[in-house]
Image (cartoon, helix red, strand yellow):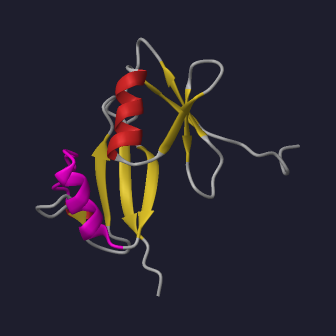
Amino acid sequence: MFKQTHAFSGFSVNDLQKAKEFYSNVLGIDVTENKMGLLELHIAGSNNIIVYPKPNHAPATFTILNFPVSDIDKTVDELTGLGVVFEQYTDPQLKTDEKGICRGEPNIAWFKDPAGNILSVIEQRQD
């Protein structure tokens, strides 16, 4: 039934304007408003992702978007310079360093959008 469909995902935020500023100005993603007034994130090689307002928004307790990067240290440094705060985890299975990077296979670092949704940068080296 859905074998040939082009599915897309979406998530809620409590403030569309803050989300638009964060995703476009901080993360550098192309963001547009559609005819319904919702945001569309234009991710390379993917279907658009819908961002919609929800008055009683509760942040996702899991990672909603993973951004592959070739150099996680450089990316974390750049995002930190733009005001992004990386999560710190102390669990032995999920311990992060002083930058907020969990070193392993793969290296990954988590941060939140203005609505509290969890995002990550994940290192995928191209050798």
Which residue is outermost to the right? 1
* Position above or below: 111 against 59: below
In this rendering, the answer to whether 86 lies above or below 49 is below
- The verdict on residue 78 being magenta is yes
Residue 44 rendering spot, x and y as whole percentages = 58, 56
Is 127 left, or right, of 121 in this rendering? right
Horizontal side, residue 89 vs residue 29: left or right: left
* 49 or 88: nearer the viewer: 49
Q: In the displayed image of the protein, which residue is found farthest to the left?
A: 98
Q: Quadrant of residue 35?
A: top right
Image location of residue 77, percent across then percent down: 20, 61
Image-quadrant location for residue 20: top left
29 with respect to 40 (left or right)? left
Q: Quadrant of the N terminus?
A: top right
Residue at the spot 39% in from the left edge and 30% down from the top edge? 19
Residue 101 versus residue 32 in the image, above or below: below
Q: Using the image as rendered, state which of residue 11 and residue 25 is in the foreground.
A: 25
Q: Is residue 45 magenta?
A: no
In the picture as drawn, the residue positioned furthest to the bottom comes out as 127
Q: Give the magenta part as a residue range.
A: 71-91
Q: Decide if residue 99 is on the left or right side of residue 41.
A: left
Number of numbered markers: 0
Residue at (15, 61) in percent of width and height: 99
Relative vertical location of residue 104 with respect to residue 87 in this rendering, above or below: below
Q: Nearer the viewer, residue 102 or 48?
A: 48
Name which residue lies at 19% across and 44% down. 83
Residue 28, percent from left and from top? 40, 48
Q: Position of residue 112 (x, y in %)?
A: 30, 41
